[in-house]
Amino acid sequence: MKVLVVDDEVDIQDLFLQKFRKEIRNGEIEFSFATSGENALVYLHEHESEAILILSDINMPGMSGIELLREIVEKNTKPKPIVMMITAYGDDETRNKALSLGADDFLNKPLDFGDLKERLFKR
């Protein structure tokens, strides 16, 4: 499974690589990382349909995760990847907006990696 993680916190990459060390080693999952919505769109354009699942933070400088989601849904000519939104703010308004725009799931920070693994591998 190829996953694109979009988060402006650069230390998130090390955290994901540590928490999924076994799954990466076993070839069950492969991660790519983008530090902004704009970088994520460049990655998706350069690697058409390579990422089958996107984990995106909502609050980022520049393009927000909500704006990224809108771009993915509106302009993706290939089958839309699964998009899971991640935020430190679990308010209903943000959640409903993300879901109404086409998010497939919604996770709160700090991430519960056990729950995340369960959600990723049940798909």
Image (tube, helix red, strand yellow):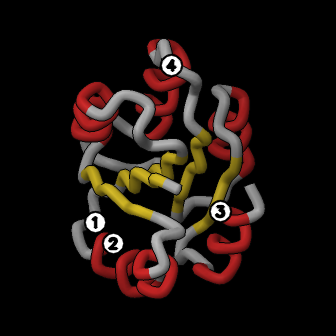
| Residue 6 in view here | yes
- The residue positioned 38% from the left and 86% from the top of the image is 18
The total of numbered circles placed on residues is 4
| Secondary element at image label 3 | helix
**Residue 78 circle label:** 4
**Label 1: element kind:** loop
Q: Position of residue 44 (x, y in %)?
A: 33, 32
Q: Which disc, if any, is residue 120?
A: 3
Q: Disc 2 versus disc 1: distance between alpha carbons?
A: 6 Å
Q: Nearer the viewer, mark 4 or mark 2?
A: 4
Q: Is residue 10 left or right of residue 82?
A: left
Q: 43 or 100: nearer the eye?
A: 43
Residue of label 1: 9
Where residue 2 sits in the image (x, y, percent)? 46, 53
Give residue 73's position: percent from left, percent from top: 55, 21
Residue beneath the point at 30% across and 34% down: 47
Amino acid type of the residue tagged 2 in the rendering? Ile
Question: Are discs 2 and 1 less than 8 Å apart at CB?
Answer: yes
**Residue 55 horizontal side relative to residue 17, left or right:** right
Q: In terms of sequence position, does the residue under pointer 2 or pointer 3 come before the other?
A: 2
Residue carrying label 2: 12
